[in-house]
Image (tube, grey):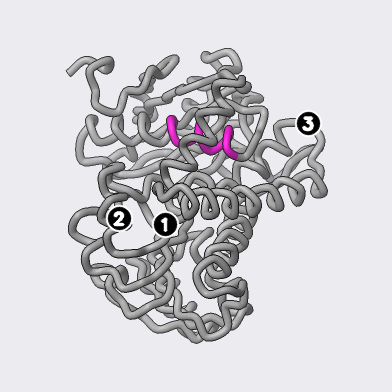
Amino acid sequence: MSIFSHPDFSDHEGVYFASDPETGLKVIIAVHSTARGPAAGGTRFWHYDTDAEAVTDALRLSKAMSYKNAAAELPLGGGKAVIMKPEGTFDRTALFAAYGRAIERLSGSYITAEDVGVTPADMDVIHTQTQCVAGLSTGEAASGDPSPITAEGVFRGLQVGAEHIWGSENLTGKTVAVQGLGHVGYALCEKLHRAGAKLLVADINEEVIAKAVSELSAVKVGVADIHAQEADIFAPCALGGALNAKTVPDMKAKLIAGAANNQLRDDSVMSLIEEKGIIYLPDYVLNAGGIINVAAEVSGEYNQAWVEEKLVGLKATIKTILEVSTAQKISTLRVANQIAEERLKRA
């Protein structure tokens, strides 16, 4: 299949394939749009069963980054990279250095940061080869791991959703089923626990589940069952595709609000969500805290007040989406897409 006939190709400006046999690097860098600025988006380091899966992930995630950055009104375009995790043993430092060289060859059109499977230490290695990297642990504008800011944005948006449904941002007594306790998912759980919410949690990492049970009074749930729990809110914070034709019919939550990218298996799933009477907060709007933090670092002078202003804006955008969706009787996803597409057109 040609990349141009791929069902997830959406007039991407460029899709780049790079390899380095010595380190085992195989990476796809998808630049969806540079209309608002250099394409920015994290790097995902994951095991893919096929090359086709990696390509699909890169195409979908990069388009979502264009929409995310536009919705957050950031001076950045949208891009994403996925590195196919090598089988067996490999030199991680050498691999990420090779990846840094691949980014440098794109002459500033793509700026990377962390995503699933990648750490601030990896960003530091990439930085030895290119300046087109953020989420650094050292440096004049370094902001470190953006995960806590992502979690803060999700939490604030979740509060807006709660007010829309129950008339108050107060989450005391609300049950939240959290799928995935990575850096963002666990940070979100900590915020929910402090806010008085009851936590149901699922993750393949038994150690982090035990920590949540011990520290946050969470209740462990099976990975295959977390979506179907008797919960007020379902928060997908793992990989994409959690909302699909198999899971949505079993959901009992009134609100879906999580940090995962590409939560919908495809846009047609929105009709199933609406039929269930569930309110869905579009993922790329809700989880923009991390890229907001990255944008502050990319500017060359990290400004916490600017980040806070953008988080306030994120919350306002979520409120607008809910209000317009209710008034016009159209899906929240459609409203969010209209906002993002209009801002892209203006650019």
**Callout 1–callout 2 Cβ contact below 8 Å:** yes
Q: Nearer the viewer, mark 1 or mark 2?
A: 1
Residue at numbered disc 1? 280
Residue 260 visible here: yes
Q: In this view, does 219 lie to the left or right of 148?
A: left
Three-letter residue code for mark 2: Leu
Q: Which of marks 3 and 2 is nearer the N terminus?
A: 2
Q: Which of 245 and 275 is in front in this view?
A: 275
Q: What stretch is highlighted in magenta?
A: 62-71
Asked which secondary structure carries label 1, the reply is: strand
Q: Badge 1 local density, few (<14 within 10 Å), some, or many (20+)?
A: many
Considering the image in quadrants, where does the C terminus appear?
top right
Across and down, in percent, residue 235 comes to 43, 64
Q: Is residue 16 visible in this depiction of the protein? A: no
Q: Which mark is residue 300?
A: 3
The one of 178 and 277 positioned closer to us in this rendering: 277
Tell me which label, 1 or 3, sits earlier in the chain: 1
Number of numbered discs overlaid on the protein picture: 3
